[in-house]
Image: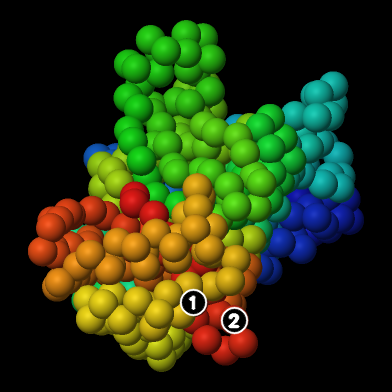
């Protein structure tokens, strides 16, 4: 007897009660009401590359179609769809779990995702958490036409910015279009097993802030340096710059926060599973890894992305650019007191506070007969979780009558009493 022949029976009317609750939401992926087209939040990668937003394949699309069939009581069709997911992703444990539920429905009512008897409860709960996270990604897709408010200005050489929404288990990829962000794709991710807001070494939490990719660790190097522990990182890792200058100012410590893959015996991990890193499927990590620029690609981690209309950051960009230019001009004009007025009262370089910094600058500038300061490749990112903090990074070319230097510099600007001032400054 076919599964669909039983769909009118009383047991099956209740068998998929929990799944039907989410199936309605899942239908939004199958036929997106905004565009009238199938739209997927994440897609399969056969030859890994960044995926485009109009793709309609991949595990979440297959999962949503499975639940769509369940919602329409076409249970044989649901099995067929989940079989496709298992065929394409043989180690996708959640797909195996759902297929098991569909087969169990032949014999008895089901009340939740994961009904196999004797299965470890902790493993089942992890898979249920992944099901909830993936279905939430389907239900609450990125607002069309909006961008994260954090991306105020990308510098010309930055090809992409990565924005992680820890609340949605999602990493978004945006490309640089004339300094502004344009959506490319997004991926399901796992974060720290103890959640967010990392504070100290070993707390198994994921940090929130503005970071950069600082390196690339191959599978071979992981095997050499970490032995059996390398298995948890999958195909490779991309370290990021935690703790950044703001983290250290706030007393946060720890190290080894990476983007990385997953063990080869699984397709993906539960949403809270890492030691604080951001874990992607090995296929998705490979796609991202090929595109990131070491030392250039920003990674912004937020607990819930603030979405704004494209171009909405123009006013903030112009305001901050005006303050940066005023700071540069006052320095170049050797107007030392006006130059120092751009610094906040609790400014620090990490080694010097404002009073010591001011004494040094007055002494140095007194010996100058001329100064020229040129800034290039300026990027501006608003800090997640705050509306009064921004990170400005640029190439600085300095020349004077007795010194010529070039450096990459980063400043943290804070709004005090309505005025932007420099809270931190230092070489990158």
Q: Are marks 2 and 1 in contact (CB under 8 Å)?
A: yes
Q: Along the polypeptide, which appears first: circle 2 or circle 1?
A: 2
State whether residue 77 appears in this view. no
Instruction: Give the vertical position of 36 relative to 215 (above or below).
Output: below
Residue plotted at (50% across, 53% down): 352
Q: Could you tell me which residue is drawn at 66 percent across and 46 percent down?
A: 251
Classed neighbour count for the residue bearing mark 2: other residues with Cα under 10 Å, few (<14), some (14–19), many (≥20)? few
Residue 114 in the image: state x and y as whole percent: 77, 38
Q: Is residue 372 left or right of residue 40?
A: left
Q: Is residue 339 left or right of residue 266?
A: left
Q: Is residue 224 left or right of residue 369?
A: right
Seen at 35% across and 76% down, the residue is 336
Rendering quarter of residue 168: bottom right
**Residue marked by disc 1:** 421
User: Residue 46's x, y, as percent?
Assistant: 29, 40
Residue sitting nearer the eye, 371 or 64: 371
Q: Which residue is mark 2?
A: 416
| Residue pictured at 48% horizontal, 73% vertical | 343
Q: Quadrant of residue 129?
A: top right
Is 295 located above or below residue 227 in the figure?
A: below
Relative to 423, say whether 251 is above or below. Answer: above
- How is the model colour-coded? rainbow
Secondary structure category for the residue under label 2: strand
Is 146 or 352 nearer to us in this picture?
Answer: 352
Tell how many labels.
Answer: 2
């Amino acid at each position: 007897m076919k599964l669909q022949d039983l769909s009118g029976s009383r047991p099956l009317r209740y068998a998929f009660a929990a799944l039907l609750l989410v199936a309605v939401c899942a239908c939004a992926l199958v036929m997106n009401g905004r565009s009238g087209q199938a739209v997927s939040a994440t897609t399969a990668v056969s030859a890994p590359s960044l995926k485009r937003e109009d793709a309609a394949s991949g595990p979440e699309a297959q999962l949503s179609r499975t639940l769509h069939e369940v919602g329409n009581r076409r249970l044989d069709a649901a099995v067929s769809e989940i079989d496709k997911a298992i065929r394409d992703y043989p180690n996708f444990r959640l797909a195996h779990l759902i297929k098991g539920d569909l087969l169990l429905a032949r014999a008895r009512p089901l009340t939740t995702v994961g009904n196999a008897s004797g299965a470890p409860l902790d493993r089942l709960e992890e898979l249920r958490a992944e099901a909830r996270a993936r279905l939430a990604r389907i239900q609450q897709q990125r607002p069309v036409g909006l961008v994260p408010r954090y991306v105020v200005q990308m510098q010309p050489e930055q090809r992409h910015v990565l924005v992680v929404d820890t609340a949605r288990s999602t990493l978004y990829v945006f490309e640089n279009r004339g300094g502004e962000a344009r959506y490319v794709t997004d991926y399901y991710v796992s974060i720290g097993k103890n959640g967010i807001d990392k504070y100290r070494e070993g707390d198994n939490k994921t940090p929130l802030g503005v970071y950069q990719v600082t390196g690339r660790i191959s599978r071979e190097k992981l095997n050499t340096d970490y032995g059996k522990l390398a298995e948890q990182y999958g195909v490779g890792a991309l370290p990021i710059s935690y703790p950044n200058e703001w983290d250290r100012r706030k007393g946060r410590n720890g190290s080894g926060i990476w983007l990385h893959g997953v063990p080869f015996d699984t397709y993906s991990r539960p949403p809270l599973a890492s030691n604080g890193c951001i874990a992607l499927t090995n296929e998705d990590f490979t796609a991202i890894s090929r595109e990131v620029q070491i030392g250039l690609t920003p990674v912004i981690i937020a607990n819930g992305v603030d979405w704004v209309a494209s171009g909405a950051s123009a006013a903030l960009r112009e305001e901050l650019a005006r303050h940066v230019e005023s700071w540069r001009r006052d320095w170049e004009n050797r107007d030392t007191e006006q130059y120092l007025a751009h610094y906040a009262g609790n400014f620090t370089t990490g080694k010097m506070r404002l009073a010591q910094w001011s004494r040094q600058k007055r002494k140095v500038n007194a010996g100058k007969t001329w100064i020229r300061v040129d800034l290039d490749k300026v990027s501006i990112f608003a800090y997640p979780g705050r509306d009064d903090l921004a990170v400005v990074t640029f190439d600085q070319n300095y020349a004077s009558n007795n010194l010529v230097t070039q450096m990459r510099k980063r400043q943290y600007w804070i709004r005090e009493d309505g005025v932007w001032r420099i809270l931190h400054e230092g070489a990158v």
